[in-house]
Image (tube, rainbow, N blue to C red):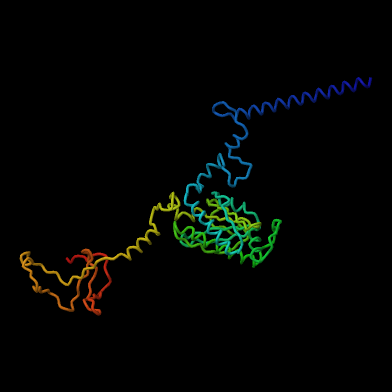
Amino acid sequence: MSDTNDTSQMTDDERAAAEWEASLAAEAEGGAASVEAEMVSEDGRVLNQNEIDSLLGFDTGDVIGKPTSGIHAILDKSLMAYEKLPMIEVVFDRLVRMMSTSLRNFTSDSVDVSIDSMISMRFDDYLNSIPLPAMLVIFRAIEWENFGLVTIDSSQIYSTVDVLLGGRRAQRPIRVEGRPYTTIEQDIVQRMVEVMLHDMSSSFDPISPVTFQLERLEGNPRFATITRPSDAILLVRLRVEMEERGGSVEIVLPHNTLEPIRELLLQMFMGEKFGQDKMWERHIAREVRSTKVDVDVILDEKKMQLSDVLNFKVGTTLLLNRAPDDSVQLKCNGVHLGSGKVGRVGDNVAVRLNDPLKSRPPEPEA
């Protein structure tokens, strides 16, 4: 009798559980049907999760250096990609070659510098991505009247200190300590960055002469604000390898800093100039200064009839309205240059200038 009651009781429990599961399944199917009705494209196709995330601009991965979509892509349209500035690659390729030589002389060790990446991003996103501890060096572009930033990671700092202070080549990676940097380490970093800034100034010389001057060193990214958080920047990551040691160096140039030479960076090759070409100006000026020209010294000018000129004979005397101490006129190809006085230096006749040479002829008297 008890077995029958237990069986009927279990049957009732199972029946109640089955009814509950059926109701939950019906609600779930109704909710899914409503979601699918909302997430249907114009052509009647149901959108998958990736397409929905792309439409809404959601990205669960690392956003640094990866293309965005949706709303984020619309907002990031104001970011000027470095591909639109062809000369940037030329400048930093030259910087890599110069830094390899300069750091090799600085450390007396084998140094290999390469470009790891070159991207455009927001300045605030970059500050949030800096791994700590790190050394941030703020520098000023004097001619452009703006600032830039150089970030050196701990591995590069400890490797440079180890090389300069005679450390042995360790087979294991250098342990990164979470302590503040000492005065010696800061001085070594400052000297290394000064070498880098000098090379970077030289790499920009063919496009536009500029002087990068070191301002200060910071250990906190929040104290290294050189532009507004939402402004676009150009981030160049350099990989510095010293045999079994090394690290990374990041150069940050806000687009506001590059704005004065933006037109020059848009050119496709070094010889294409939108404005003045300083190199050719210096070359032409040097060649013009070494050019020989004929200068005419005019004692006096006198109008005569052609018949009198045809009657000229050897020994004919021409009377000029000039005294020995009067000034003479200097002309080049009919252009008036100035005035002077005739004299003698040894066996040569000389002219002493009374005033500086003029580049334009004198204005006619009214």
Say whether residue 224 is left or right of residue 17: left
Task: From the viewer's side, name the closer residue of 171 and 366.
Answer: 171
Query: Where is the N terminus found, in terms of image quarters?
Result: top right
Task: From the viewer's side, name the closer residue of 3 and 311.
Answer: 311
Name the spot of residue 76 as percent of width and height, x first.
53, 45
Q: Residue at x 48, y 62 (%)?
A: 211
Name the spot of residue 6 as percent of width and height, x first.
90, 23
Name the spot of residue 165 as percent of width and height, x first.
66, 66
Task: From the viewer's side, name the closer residue of 273 and 42.
Answer: 273
Whether residue 345 appears in this view of the structure is yes
Q: Residue at x 25, y 76 (%)?
A: 352
**Compared to 34, does 163 lie above or below?**
below
Say whether residue 204 is left or right of residue 125: left
**Compared to 97, does 336 lie above or below?**
below
Total numbered labels: 0
Q: Residue at x 56, y 29 (%)?
A: 41
**Compared to 70, does 97 lie above or below?**
below
Whether residue 38 appears in this view of the structure is no
Q: Residue at x 93, y 22 (%)?
A: 2
Name the spot of residue 161 as percent of width and height, x first.
65, 64
Looking at the image, which residue sits at the far front?
314
Looking at the image, which residue sits at the far bottom?
346
**Compared to 258, does 288 lie above or below?**
below
Location of residue 311 by image quarter: bottom left
